[in-house]
Amino acid sequence: MRAFKIVMCGDGGVGKTSLVSRFTGSPFNPMQRLTVGVSHHVRELSTSDGPVKLIVWDLGGEERFRFLAPVFLKGARGAVFVFDVTREETFEHLEDWLAVVLDVAGDLPRVLVGNKVDMATYRVVSRERAEDYAARKGFLAYFETSAKDGANTDVPFIALAEFLSGVGDWPQGLSVS
């Protein structure tokens, strides 16, 4: 079975840990604490090209953990960038996260995720703006999720796994939701 290291990138409090926890089978925890340092999660998937194992590394999003980035990013085959659709600054900071990844790990296959879409009343970053950013910055796709209600939480990971296992082809018929 092939294994791929995937890294979660984004500011603290955007829901990276909640997303990856949902993806690996844990329920939403409203009392989830900020990640201190680095944690990792594993899930096996069936892709159109056979079974794969995703090892998802989750780096604490606070500035004080950025020094871990070179070790965190070493050997990564893909990245999931996450921002909170209700917090403008988390969207603006994607540029910093992207610069670090490009500098340390190179031009990895990556997807962009706007999380917390269940909080529509408080939304400040539009889908159109995020889709435009993803297209301009070389992301494979943009997805909207809610770790709280479970909406689309598997989709970004499955899409990235399909891309990585398919030797560069974006899966036919994949819906970007």
Image: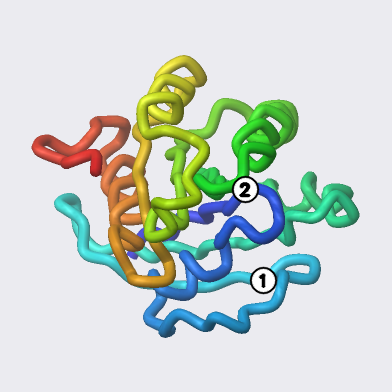
Q: Which of the two residues, 23 or 166, is positioned nearer the viewer here? A: 23
Q: How is the image coloured?
A: rainbow
The residue that disc 1 covers is 39
Looking at the image, residue 24 lies above or below residue 114: below
Please identify the quadrant where the C terminus is shown: top left
Whether the residues at callouts 1 and 2 have beta carbons within 8 Å, the answer is: no
Precedes in sequence: disc 1 or disc 2:
2
Q: Which of the two residues, 73 or 88, is positioned nearer the viewer here? A: 88
Please identify the quadrant where the N terminus is shown: bottom left
Mark 1, other Cα within 10 Å: few <14 / some 14–19 / many ≥20: few
As helix, strand or loop, the secondary structure at mark 1 comes to strand
Give the alpha-carbon distance from disc 1 to disc 2, as whole Å.
12 Å
Percent x, y of residue 133: 48, 22
Residue positioned 67% across, 28% down in the render: 95
Residue positioned 30% across, 36% down in the render: 167
> Nearer the observer, disc 1 or disc 2?
2
Can residue 175 be seen in this snapshot? yes
The residue that disc 2 covers is 9
Percent x, y of residue 57: 60, 61
Residue positioned 37% across, 33% down in the render: 127
Find residue 70 and report its image quarter.
top right
As helix, strand or loop, the secondary structure at mark 2 comes to strand
Position of 12 with respect to 107 (left or right) is: right
Percent x, y of residue 88: 62, 38
